[in-house]
Image (cartoon, helix red, strand yellow):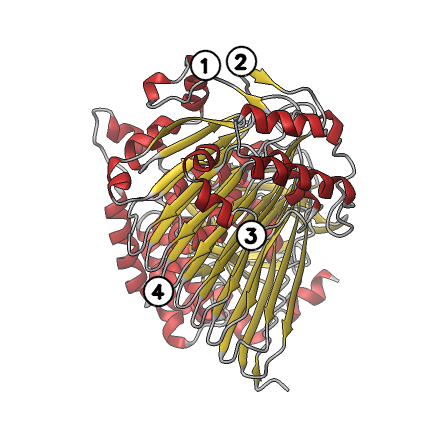
Amino acid sequence: MSLLIKNLSVSLGGKLILQDINLEIKRGEIHALMGPNGSGKSTLAQAVMGNSEFRLQNSGARIIIDKKDVKNLKPDERAKKGLFLAFQNPVAIPGVSVANLLKIAYRLNNEQRTKKKNQEKIYNPALSVWEFNESLVEKAKKLDIPQDFLRRSLNEEFSGGEKKKLEILQALVLEPKYAIFDEIDTGLDIDALKIVAKAIIELRKMGCGILLITHYQRILKFAKPNFVHILIRGKIVESDGYRLAEKVERSGYKKWIQKSS
Amino acid sequence: MFRAIRGILHFVQNDISSMTQVAIQSTIDYKYGFHKPENYVFKAKKGLSKEIVEEISRQKREPPWMRDFRLKSLEIFLSKEMPKWGRDLSNINFDDIYYYLKPIRNKAKSWDDLPKDIKDTYDRIGIPEAEKKFLGGISAQYESEVVYKSIQKTLAKKGVIFLDMDSGLAQHPDIVKEYFGRLVPPEDNKFAALNSSVWSGGSFIYVPKGVRVELPLQAYFRINAANMGQFERTLIIADEGSFVHYIEGCTAPIYSTDSLHAAVVEIFVKKNARVRYTTIQNWSTNVYNLVTKRMTVEEEGIGEWIDGNIGSKLTMKYPSVYLVGKGAKGEILSIAYAGKNQYQDAGGKVIHLAPKTFSRITSKSVSMAGGKTTFRGLVKVSSEALGSRTKTVCHALMMGKDSRSETYPSMDIRVSDVVAEHEATVSKIGEEQLFYIASRGVGRSEAEALIVNGFIEPIVKELPLEYAVELNRLIQMEMEKHA
């Protein structure tokens, strides 16, 4: 069971951004993707989620969720297969609260489970509306999100750190099989960073396979990755364990940048 | 000159979204786009003339003053030019419209008495359901004539009059003569003149002093004959200290030729009384919806318009409130939804004519798939209106590349001691927002419905439950059209 990315090349507006990316994230693993600005980290996140602005360049590319190629599926269908993306810059959605979004998303993502509940087998049924609300409030509390935030328009007039926490909250509620966190750590103070890292560890414990996109080693100290990948100019140039992140922290990306030019 | 005028103008344009465009598909069948065989006792020939107007008055056995009023209004209609502002009305062919139809000879007293095809029509739009659950009394208009009404007995006991306008004129000619055409005279505008000359149906409500009507009074209107104009006329008088909530709901089947709806509503709110008038109109998209709605509010009274416009090809409608007594309050809540090929030109007007009066206009408009909305607001504060307050808030939501939204708020303030506020926002929903929501497992049409329903929610919660649910369902269906 894994999120498998094979031979993925991606362009945006006719410009080639990613070249031949290969990654496999198994359930319960944390992978860190590090790289300088403009190296294509967010492009990878957007392309895997299915943003149609980002075009796949080669017919041989594969995005496989648990053996099913989702390359031709729409973003909402990929999400229903268990994929989640926490955005680097979550867009404001006037009039839609995180509570309302999650309520409908939870229902749509769990239609099968709900159906089963209504038939005879009550194995792992979906939460009722009441249970759902309870669990949402409880999860928000854990993340130190004030309850009234749940009713406000999503990402409107929230600080950067608050928005990131709301992204994490959505992941906790939707319980994805695979989650990509695109710079979830930027704009967070140390307390918020610890809370977010704790939530990521919790997701991992639930069996979620995680891709953590970041510039800094900071968050990786709290949520230790199994693997670290370095992305330079659209290519993964090196992969290793946690010590690779320490190397980046010490001497930056210069070594790889020089090599690739 | 002004001691305190606060003008707040937020112009928030979240236009990060010109990525790709919303795919616009041809609209699928309109939900209410069916129609029943026509079955009329009397159908006037097409077009408008002195003879037709006289025939209408004769058929209705009206007193001479009403016939003369109609004929005078006809002259005014013929002499007035089409409005030169607003939207293009040149496609309306006044000669190609039936101005009067009388569908069945006698009015039904109960649901069971209604002819089957009429009942079928109502069944399909779910009216009996609504009636069973929530309605205080129904006066449903099929064609020009009210054919069915069931008035709660308690209403009569309290002295409340709730009739169709024709019966109102027949049974209470003195009250009608005193108030009819006083707020909206035929000289007001071309379509008010047209309505005044050929009006038929509508509601007549009188609430006596101190009487509170706790359940909303409701009426449904429906156009069912091709090329038939609908010219209903509603008159509401709420005497001192009384309260009434009137709800008008409209659905209409679709036809290939253009259809005209030109109604007039006049409401008198006396001292300490309160009237709320709620409309959710869902005309099919070939209807020109041109309505003049006006109310006066006396001392410490409250007048409220809740005006929702979802359907029609073109709506031009600006409910207005004249605050004539000290401490009077007026509130206008306007919702407009314009989909493909639709134009909603809506808003509200408030005229402050007395001290310490208060008004608020709140507008929410949604334009989608190339639809266009315009907010037109007017607030006048006369030199008499010392210590008054007024606030206009308009929020527009645009979805899709070719959708348009315009805002024309205007204020005319002739006194210094007043607080006037204005706030406007425009939000653009594009691919970026839809992608975000999709990444949570929510597809396009559900996402659009979520956004639109969230956007209009502050107004929807003012509606009775039945209407709120129906409105949400209509929005959902509209979104599915474009999916």
User: Is B41 located above or below residue A14 in the figure?
Assistant: above
Mark 2, Cα crowd under 10 Å, few <14 / some 14-19 / many 20+, is some
Q: Which residue, given by chain and number where applicable, does mark 1 sit on?
A: B117
Q: Nearer the viewer, mark 1 or mark 2?
A: 2
Query: What residue is disc 3 on?
Result: B182
Say which of marks 3 and 2 sits in front.
3
Residue type marked 1: Asp
**Quadrant holding the C terminus of chain B:** top right
Whether discs 3 and 4 lie on one chain: the answer is no
Q: What residue type is labelled 3?
A: Arg
Q: Distance between the residues labelled 1 and 2?
A: 9 Å
* Position of A91 relative to A113 (above/below): below
The residue mark sitting in front, 3 or 4, is 3
| Pointer 3 chain | B
Instruction: Tell me the tag on residue A130.
Output: none
> CA separation, marks 3 and 2?
35 Å
Task: Quote the CA–CA distance across marks 3 and 4.
Answer: 49 Å
Labels 4, 2: one chain: no
Residue at the image point whose x is 45% and y is 14% from the top:
B117
Mark 4 neighbour density, 10 Å: few (under 14) some (14–19) many (20 or more):
few
Residue B330 in the figure: left or right of residue A174:
right
Question: Mark 4: which amino acid?
Answer: Asp
Q: Are marks 3 and 2 on the same chain?
A: yes
Residue at 58% in and 25% down: B58
Q: Can residue B32 be seen in this view?
A: yes
Q: Earlier in the sequence, mark 1 or mark 3?
A: 1
Task: From the image, tell me which residue sits under label 2.
Answer: B39
Report helix, strand or loop for mark 4: helix
Coordinates of residue B259 in the picture (x, y in percent): 66, 30
Confirm whether residue B307 shows in the render: no
